[in-house]
Image (cartoon, rainbow, N blue to C red):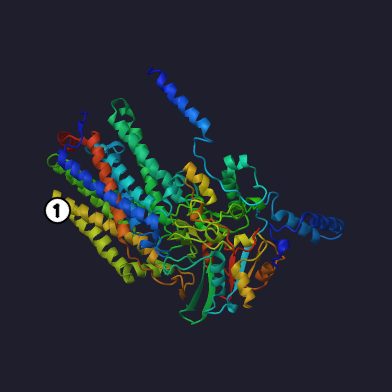
Amino acid sequence: MSGCEKAPGCDTGGSSRRSFMAGLIGAGVLSVAPGVTLYRFAEAKEAGGAVTSAVRWGMLIDTTKCETGCTDCITACNDEHGLTSKGRPRTDAQWIRKIDARDKKTGKQWSLPMMCQHCAEPPCVDVCPTGASFKRADGIVLVDKHICIGCRYCMMACPYKARSFIHEDLENQKSYSPRGKGVVEGCTLCVHRVDAGRRPACVDACRAAGHNAMMFGDINDPDSEISKRLSHFPATAIRADLGLDPGVRYQGI
Amino acid sequence: MIRGLPVLVVMTCLAGAAAADTWVPVPFIPKGKGEACVRDVAFMRTQHMELLVHQRDATVHRGVRPKDSRLPACLECHAVAGKAGKPVTYKDPKHFCRSCHDYASVKIDCFSCHNSVPDPSEVAHQ
Amino acid sequence: MKSIRYGTLAMGRRRFWAMLAGAATIAGVGLLAAGSMEHQGHWITGMDNQIVWGLPHVFAVFLIVAASGALNVASMGSVFGRTAYKSLARLSGLLTIALLVGGLSVLVLDLGRPDRLIVAMTTYNFRSIFAWNIFLYTGLVIVVAVYLWVQMTHRLRRFQGAAGVVALVWRLTLTTGTGLIFGMLVAREAYDAAVMAPLFIAMSLAFGMALFIPALLALQDGPLDDALLSRMARLLGIFVAATLYFVAVQHLVNLYAAEHIGVERFILADGGIITGLFWVGQILLGGIVPLVLLLVGTITPLRVVIACGLIVLGGFAQVYVIIIGGQAYPLELFPGAVETSSFFDGQIASYRPSLHELALGIGGCGVAVLIALIGLRALPLLPAPAALREAAE
């Protein structure tokens, strides 16, 4: 339930908000819950529009609903960001990929999408010499391509091999996803969509196709659908022993 | 006679300048669409980098997205039509940014990553 | 103490200019290769999204590590008071600068955006060991330059000791930082080890000395004193032994832990060229054979030069195994499972270096030789032979 009301940067218009709040102030004396909503709404974005750490964006992937061979999320991501193949798989950018795994002893198989895990303690942010790899206040880990020097140290440091280096000149970039030769990039959790109150393209594509394997939301909000699911069903982080506290969790592995 | 020569040369140049409209080549800056830009000409002439650099850092690092400071919006209004009415890219000298930057000989780096024409398939992202 | 006389490089003009032109050509070819990489993009190289750092980084790390070790001769003279080495301090300092700048030029030219070098030198994320290294590398050039200046200026002689200590501490920090570039990466099985810091210190001492001794032999007028050569040869032997010790500790401890068996099996047994480079290049040719040559029997200049050459080759092999081998082994996202994906998960990554990378790496060596030649010709850095003979007694 990551509708417009919960997302920062979503502007429903000043006057409707004022009348809403006026009604609440009357009712708010009588119950606690509207007060909590008030608090969350005001805290989610600062005056001036900056994101805050009141929100932490996360994803939950149910691998039992994820089929081997389905690549809807990958297609959606590539379309959204204009990631086209140059016919050289080893140097083509891949922001999200499907991993098919099979346990050697038991033979159990599973399939899941792997992308930047948006860790709370990202090693890529620690190692970047210029600070181009950074974590936004709301938990999204990004590359500031204006100051990236293309040293690829973050690619060495990422435990999930989430980052790609752009190996050639590019054209016809999407206006909301600028990318160019010589810098490093990775899954942005569709930050341009999230800031507009929408879900990442992969999550939307998975829902639209009816698989419903991917869920997105605010894991700091105990009332969000994703938080409720995380509190009821076991979910793990990949390479959890590294202690990175990723924002992406998986069920069924 | 010799001392008077430089004075003579300068006077001739000034006379020539007075005769011509301008004696220094100036860039031809294509007019943008709409009534006015998001900032006035004086600001843009001297401080468009304020928007492009400092505002950009606020957008990337803090998620601040003022509606009038989006690069695609600038490109939309300042698109210059080329062949078949399609906007020209940065490769073409008629591109809006190049009209000044070629003249001032200041190389810019934006369009190795950013598209230099408005993206027609773009869903309106505010 | 008698004051030592120093001179500039006494090479015939024609020979000097020929060598200069040769080094400049090599450096120029490297520059062209880098220009091509920058213009077309890195797809023309053998590096990709799996093997992210390749041959240029092998050259760069080797040169930088050797640079730090080359300064050891000066440290032994000024900080540790071994008079035999005092007269060699200036040459040591110049070689440090030459090798360091050579290595840095390779590193910088391989960047995806070398035009942003100013950004790299002014915007620092100080949680990054890489940022510290950028600061330390450029700083060492300045520190050693000051050290050389202090040595060459009579009225500043009393600062020699202090300058020597600063240089020593700086280069130990730098080499520790270089080792920790890899040692602090938790993601990769072959790295993530604190022992890489002292390992790199030992490597620097061995590589630096192995480049210094042949340089000294080549530049000296007449034969080098036997006693001094023996002393340096034995010291080099100890450095090689120290390197082997840290390598042994790293691999034996890794073999003990079940979670590291996979990567150890890859490096020590299954890794194809990586395994070959490890055992034959690094251990045998770069370690055991030089140990025998340097510590067993009588020292002759020929033996020492062969040992030095082998140590350099073995050193390249070692850095290649560390950098390429460490990346070739796949990340284990699901221990105990076989992984496949369109992004080459679960596979040993293969790497074929391109000519561009080789040219860039060798170009860096050319830059080092160029700087060394110019420095030796312009500044009085070489001790007169008499001074060396007296010092060795």
Residue A60 image position (x, y, % from top left): 61, 69
The part of the image, by quadrant, that contains residue A12 is: bottom right
Identity of the residue furthest to the bottom in this view: A107
**Left or right: where C36 falls relative to B29:** left
The part of the image, by quadrant, that contains residue C296 is: bottom left
Residue C342 image position (x, y, % from top left): 46, 72
Q: Amino acid at mark 1?
A: Gly
Residue A133 image position (x, y, % from top left): 52, 54
Location of the C terminus of chain C by quadrant is: top left
Identity of the residue furthest to the front in this view: B19
Would you place residue A242 above or below residue C108 in this image?
Answer: below
Would you place residue A146 above or below residue A231 in this image?
Answer: above
Q: As rendered, which of C40 and C311 lies closer to the eye?
A: C40
Chain label for disc 1: C
**Left or right: where A87 falls relative to C300:** right
**Left or right: where C141 falls relative to C86:** right
Q: Residues within 10 Å of mark 1 (few under 14, many from 20)?
A: few
Say which element carries label 1: loop
Location of the N terminus of chain C by quadrant is: top left
> Which residue in the structure is indicated by mark 1?
C297
Q: Is residue C71 visible?
A: no
The residue under the point 64% across, 42% down is: B40
Residue C384 image position (x, y, % from top left): 17, 34
Q: As rendered, which of A153 and B85 lies closer to the eye?
A: B85
**Left or right: where C268 falls relative to A105:** left
Identity of the residue furthest to the left in this view: C222
The residue under the point 51% across, 80% down is: A109
Would you place residue C259 above or below residue B125 in this image?
Answer: below
Q: Is residue A177 visible?
A: yes
